[in-house]
Amino acid sequence: MQPTILSDSARPSTEELAAEARRVRAARQRAILCVLGAAATFAVAAAAVKALRGEVPLMQVILFRNLLAVPVLLGLAIMAARKAGRSASLAALLTTRQPWAHAQRVLWGLVGMFGSFYGYVYLPLATVTALSFTMPFFLAALSVPMLGEKLERGRMIAMLVGFGGVLVMLRPWQGLEQTGLPLLPVLVVLAGALGWALAMITIRRMGDNGESGATIVLWFALGGTVVGGLAAIPGWDWPDARQWALLLAVGVVSAFAQLLMTAAYRSGETTLIAPFEYSGILWTTALGALIWEEWPDAWSAAGIIVLVAGGLGMWWMNTRPAPRGR
């Protein structure tokens, strides 16, 4: 077959190429700003959870976090369905052939959310954020037995570096009483990160089986609301005016953060913007220091740096071009 030769009139002009380059550059800048804003607003939501000081049962916090997100996610799902030319009715959006997979997604997602919220109460904000970034390492390790993926040497090294950062933060060789970090909350946060990793694997399986993203997020928001509500009933404690305000902030700010994160990943490439999610550590460090005087000591700061380095290494291994000849 002869190659197609474009006529001069069919070739993009210099002005058109320049305009396209400006459009791409603007979209990337917008995506980066959105992910930075999302990281900042998630940090504000975390601060609101911490400000509750454990006075409101965590399952109530989780209930309102999910309940207030439902309208936002429903609106996004309806817009996405209409744009794709599909039915935007609630029944159509919730139709699924994978109810058990959605149940698993809700379970693991709630484990992840509980782990983070529990940590915010008992640990410095920056520490919880850093520990939560172990999720990609758990995901890489679990993808081998559960998804049949191969763990390359570079990814394994990055994973070990990340977990090494956790050990530096905990420094078990000094004894727990010297670290200032209570062991139980640390373990709960790490269990939450493991829960998020299992949730991601469940989502990947559902996606491979043809489930739409809108259906997945809606089932989680609704399932999280129902399960959170049922779990909150036995220990229900009516919030006062201050607590209601903080609960409202957790839900509304988290929903706004989700909007920003969604806009970021719709405007820019994942390989470009994913590293900017680590700015969350800067935001939570700043809020923790300003509000609660949570200044990380040298060991904690070093551990956070090592953990972030491992995470960025994992990101680079997942996005670098494949070697030629493969």
Image (cartoon, helix red, strand yellow):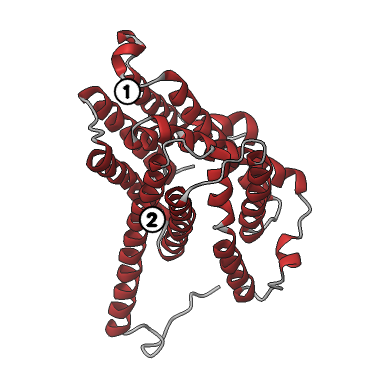
Looking at the image, which residue is at 48% across and 52% down?
A: 244
Q: Is residue 89 left or right of residue 3?
A: right
Q: Which residue is mark 1?
A: 169
Corner quadrant of residue 41: bottom left
Pick the residue in front: 175 or 99: 175
Pick the residue in front: 168 or 127: 127
Q: Which residue is mark 2?
A: 38
Looking at the image, which residue is at 59% across and 47% down?
A: 63
Q: Position of residue 4 (x, y in %)?
A: 48, 78
- Regarding residue 196, the answer to whether it shows in the image is no
Q: Position of residue 157 (x, y in %)?
A: 39, 26
Furthest residue to the left?
298
Corner quadrant of residue 299: top left
Q: Is residue 143 left or right of residue 219?
A: left
Report how many numbered discs are placed on residues in the image.
2
Furthest residue to the right?
97
Q: Please state which amino acid type lies under the numbered disc 1.
A: Met
Q: Position of residue 43 (x, y in %)?
A: 36, 47
The vertical placement of 168 against 260, above or below, is above
Pick the residue in front: 163 or 51: 51
